């Protein structure tokens, strides 16, 4: 039996916590995954997992092996890919996590452009506004918005975006446009709960900070939904520029408070600390940075 298959089964099981989830990740049967792990334990003469009816946990020997096996497999994949990818492009699977709105508007298309040059590559894109567990879910790369304090990951900044305060022409005709952030007090504002401080909108002008305390009866966890409510004339929204492109172009939303600048929010590629990145993931990060710059959306 190929020891690399055994190691892959072991790593997937350790990262997901079950043979069933590992089998799904590897695209093989549950029975075959269990067999590979058992054969690796027999080869090494140690138990790697403590098995229960619900979950498998690592033994001390398993923890030692997990600390090194992923990097060894990555290095092997990297070596084989370097030999074969010169003319064919990258192959295998890349699992990418991204926030929903930015993922739908930009990341999906960016991955399509990257995959077009690599016809043997399989893309697994998982959209969620929660931070994915990179190790537990087998994620190779996460695209994240905002600053992360997690010590277990490394990141590379891809760009930064600013937000705009917007309203519909109908809303402005009826209620007038606020001329200062402080004038937002008491206005019908749409609260995007995905923001770090959803009821505190911060701006800068001439080096001075201006803070608006926001009130509103609409609370949503989507920049797109906030923009849609603003388009319907139901209030003022504060949304990332990338979520407003079509509405601004069509004139269904117009910016207000243009003399006040929002704080830039970083967009980063995030991956596990201490892991050797496969060449295809490094190439994707480089491509993503250039693609974001070329798009002009941030």
Image (cartoon, rainbow, N blue to C red):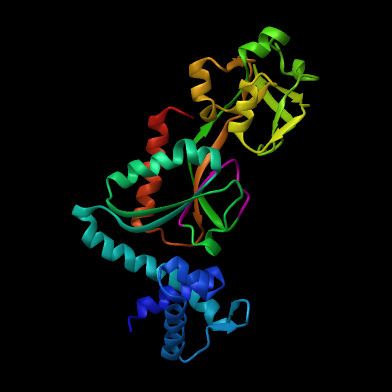
In depth, the one of 132 and 128 nearer the eye is 128
* Up-down relation of residue 111 to residue 253 (above or below): below
Residue lying at the far front of the rendered structure = 232
Residue lying at the far left of the rendered structure = 87
Q: Say whether residue 177 is magenta.
A: no
In depth, the one of 264 and 175 nearer the eye is 175
In depth, the one of 147 and 9 nearer the eye is 9
Instruction: List x then y, in percent, for residue 176.
Output: 70, 8
State left or right for residue 258 relative to residue 174. left
Instruction: List x then y, in percent, for residue 59.
Output: 58, 82
For the image, the number of numbered tags is 0
* Up-down relation of residue 156 to residue 17 (above or below): above
* Up-down relation of residue 263 to residue 179 (above or below): below
The residue located at (55%, 77%) in the rendering is 63
The residue located at (46%, 67%) in the rendering is 24
The residue located at (60%, 47%) in the rendering is 148
Quadrant of the image for the N terminus? bottom left
The residue located at (61%, 49%) in the rendering is 130
Q: Say whether residue 142 is magenta.
A: yes
Residue lying at the far right of the rendered structure = 186
Instruction: List x then y, in percent, for residue 43.
Output: 41, 89
- Magenta residues (range): 140-150
User: Image quarter for residue 122?
Assistant: bottom left
Instruction: List x then y, in percent, for residue 64.
Output: 52, 78
State left or right for residue 282 relative to residue 190. left
């Amino acid at each position: 039996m190929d020891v690399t298959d055994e190691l892959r089964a072991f790593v997937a099981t350790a990262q997901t916590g079950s043979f069933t989830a590992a089998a799904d990740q590897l695209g093989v049967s549950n029975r075959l995954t269990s067999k590979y792990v058992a054969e690796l334990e027999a080869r090494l003469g140690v138990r790697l997992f403590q098995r229960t009816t619900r979950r498998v946990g690592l033994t001390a020997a398993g923890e030692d092996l997990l600390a090194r096996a992923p990097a060894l497999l990555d290095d092997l994949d990297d070596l084989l890919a370097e030999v074969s990818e010169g003319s064919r492009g990258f192959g295998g699977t890349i699992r990418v996590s991204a926030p929903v709105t930015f993922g739908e508007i930009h990341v999906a298309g960016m991955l399509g452009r990257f995959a077009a040059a690599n016809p043997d590559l399989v893309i697994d894109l998982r959209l969620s506004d929660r931070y994915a567990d990179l190790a537990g879910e087998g994620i190779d790369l996460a695209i994240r918005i905002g600053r992360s304090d997690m010590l277990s990951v490394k990141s590379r900044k891809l760009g930064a975006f600013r937000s705009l305060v917007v309203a519909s022409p109908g809303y402005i005709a009826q209620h007038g446009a606020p001329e200062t952030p402080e004038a937002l007090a008491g206005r019908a504002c749409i609260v995007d709960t995905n923001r770090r401080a959803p009821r505190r909108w911060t701006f800068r002008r001439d080096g001075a900070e201006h803070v608006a305390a926001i009130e509103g009866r609409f609370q949503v966890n989507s920049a797109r939904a906030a923009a849609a409510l603003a388009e319907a004339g139901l209030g003022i929204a504060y949304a990332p520029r990338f979520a407003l492109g079509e509405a601004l172009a069509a004139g269904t939303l117009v910016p207000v408070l243009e003399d006040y600048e929002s704080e830039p929010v970083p967009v980063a590629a995030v991956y596990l600390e201490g892991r050797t990145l496969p060449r295809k993931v490094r190439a994707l990060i480089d491509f993503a940075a250039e693609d974001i710059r070329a798009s002009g959306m941030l």
